[in-house]
Amino acid sequence: MTERPDPAVVDILRNARFLKGISAEDLDKLAAIATLEPIKAETVLFQEGAPCDRLYVVASGLIGLDMCMPRRGCIRILTVGEGELLGWSALVGRAAMSARATVLEAGTLVAFSAKQLEDLCDRDHDVGYAIMRQISHALLKRLLATRLQMLDMFGQSSNGAATDRTQDTTTP
Amino acid sequence: MSTVSVACDPRNPWLARRARIQRITSETPGVATYDLVLDVPPQAGSFSFRPGQFNMLYLPGVGEVAISISGSAADQTVIPHTIRQAGNVTRALAELSPGATIGLRGPFGTSWPDEDCAGRDVLLIAGGIGLAPLRPVIYDLLDRRDEIGELTLLYGTRSPDSLLYAREYDDWKARGLDVHVTVDRSDATWKGNVGVVTVLLDRLPLPRPEQTIVMTCGPEVMMWYAIQSALQHGIPAASMSVSLERHMNCAIGLCGHCQLGPEFLCKDGPVFRYDRVAPILKVDDL
Amino acid sequence: MTVDVTSSPPFLMPPEGLQALIEQLARLGYHVIGPTIDQDAITYQPIDSTDDLPRGWTDVQEAGRYRLERRDDEAYFGYVVGPHSWKQYLFPPHAVLATADRTEDGWQMQTPDDDPPRFAFLGVRACELAAIAVQDRVFTGGPYVDPIYQQRRDAAFIVAVNCTLAAPTCFCTSMGTGPRCTSGFDLALTETADGFIVEAGSDAGTDLLDRLPVRRATPEELEGAEAARQQAVDQIERSMPTEGLRDLLLNNLEHPHWKDVAERCLSCTNCTMVCPTCFCSTVTEVADLTGDHVERHRQWDSCFNIDFSYMNGGVVRNDIRSRFRQWLTHKLASWHDQFDTSGCVGCGRCITWCPVGIDLTEEVAAIAGAPQRTQPADTVRESAP
């Protein structure tokens, strides 16, 4: 952990949509416990079921989240991109990562140790409250997106607009 | 934004003109584009429409179906329609070959506000087959790319094999359309975005929301949430347009089938400014 | 073409003149349609003599109830309106719109020969004149004109009749459509003890008057006619609150009362069939056995039919609640947005012919009495972060 926050890290955090609404002062506190990690394509960041001890904000790049099961194999349920949160189980869950994360496009992650972040939030409740509020909002959006995926809106009985307004015809 | 063009024989708006299928292009599973040409003088080879409008395609003995025109409005000869097989008429259409004749009435309905885009940023959000009614807008705006600010397409479909017009994306990108694509369900080879198209919106910088025009077409639930997200980003409700869908039977506002609240989708729509229809979009079973 | 009613002097025609009127119309080539008793109701059908008219009969109507009873006089027009309206002649329940024939060059589409009779309508009430005016806007007032309606309408000759009584189900006064006939007719009759007071409302009407046994009406005869017409006004029982009605209904689309009505409504479509302004239809294909000759047929339909809103794998209005709401909000609210007028003329047919006696004046009063909203509902928005 560095004494003064790395300005590059501060910059990235300031621009991260996930952290919008957090004060500059609190951002500095976060930056102080964050590290930048470059990621290469095809690297596995963490496995489904692995213990959660780190969480990330994606500065750039694209990460695919997969869930695996016997016979069906591994299914990509979501991709996480710039400005989005990754590995939130680490802060609010504490059991195991709920998906395998694979890097699809190289980039940079801002990484936090879950323990250090938790300690920071326990010590400084203002920061803690701000972080939790941001995480809640991010989860709300992800929940909505997941539900939309579940609705299967492009499935058989629903189509996109305007290209199939079929009428019932009566056969004589 | 839109004008209703009186497109039928003024003596009988129920009468279809003859059109010939010039070419059929297979797009994705169950979806093909039919290029039609009007067959009979004096309209032979001459047809004009505004992006967002639709035709009633008529298969005698089977029925009519409303299909958005999916080609460039600059081409007055060939009229492309991208059609998904879903019911009686579209399935019968899929049995036809180039050279076959069908009936055509139109163009009907309101159009996208592509004429209001000069000097503004434009965001197109499409889902599934909803990209088809927006393609005429893409063609129009790319034809005058230097008049437009940022030009972005967000497009989502069920799976990678249902991405419509994928062959054209590189050309569109080269001409200045920023294309972002996502799928609900991945497959073994897909390396791109997985998730709903509304998530892509949150990743956009959107530097001038008050100067951004949004046009969206896809399942109603997708359009709704895309718009809610756009509103949160500060894009005004009056700058957004949707394309709605109901059962079409006559296309000329006389049969009553296509009503949604006070709107006849065939003549007051299918393209609406969002603030006009916002109050009725979320009323169940309207 | 229309003549100012107030400037054309009213005439008196003796009762025998009615037969002369029918004969003159037939001589001029009109197919005369008038009220006649059929299946225990007064309906509109082709007639050729006053013997066909329901002379001495009246109708007794209430919600869900219609009976004929004998009057104690021999009035020709001593009743109001029955299950028929004139829309079945101007907007026929079944019509061929276009044909398609398979030829060597491909499909050949054509407009069919439409040679309808020229109708003369005898006995059109004020509410029905208003209904015809409403349908004029629907079928001929927009960007697309229906040639079938236009042709029949242009050729029609209208003999209106001023009501001298009202049924309990009538509410034309609330809707501003009657009971006095003021325009939209060629001739208008008021039946009195002395005979018929006749007014011309057009050049065609004036011309016809010249061929009828009429003389100038005396002031006493005119007073008698006025008193007779006033009876109709005095007998009106029901009312519809029209002030702010459009907004009231469109602001209350989620009102719990819609569910109450749905529990009674059978979705039987009677109301839409008897309503003189309802215009919903469906176009279907009819092919011959070879499949080489095809016709596009239009038939009356109803928003109460369960598949009326069918679309790609599902029905949008999947319960009676949503279909009843569609009918009533269209008729009394959306119609204003679409056609700049109410869709309801206060004829009361829907009340009479509803098998369970649903009364739209009551249903509106229930929502007006306890509205959920007086302002439009906001859209739902996710709160900003």
Image: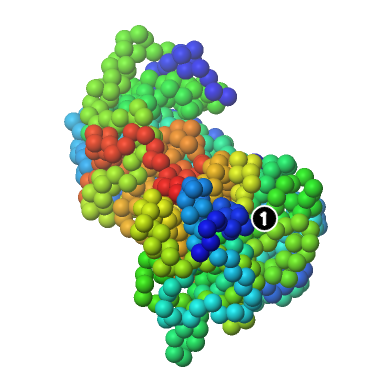
Residue in the image at 44% along x and 80% along y: A50
Residue C112, compared with residue C58, is above or below; it is: below
Q: Position of residue B284 (x, y in %)?
A: 38, 53
Instruction: Specify the quadrant of the image occupied by residue C179.
Output: top left
**Foreground pick, C234 / C173:** C173
Residue C229, compared with residue B239, is above or below; it is: above
Q: Position of residue B7 (x, y in %)?
A: 68, 48
Local crowd size for mark 1, using a 10 Å CA cut-off: few (<14), some (14–19), many (≥20): many
Residue in the image at 72% along x and 47% along y: B149
**Foreground pick, B215 / B53:** B215
Residue underneath mark 1? B152
Instruction: Specify the quadrant of the image occupied by residue A118.
Output: bottom left
Tell me if residue B246 can be seen: no
Q: Position of residue C240 (x, y in %)?
A: 29, 31
Q: Amino acid at mark 1?
A: Thr
Question: Does residue C47 appear left or right of residue B103 in this picture?
Answer: left
Residue B186, compared with residue B145, is above or below; it is: below
Residue found at the very far front of the displayed protein: A3
Residue in the image at 28% along x and 19% along y: C230
Residue in the image at 68% along x and 61% along y: B179
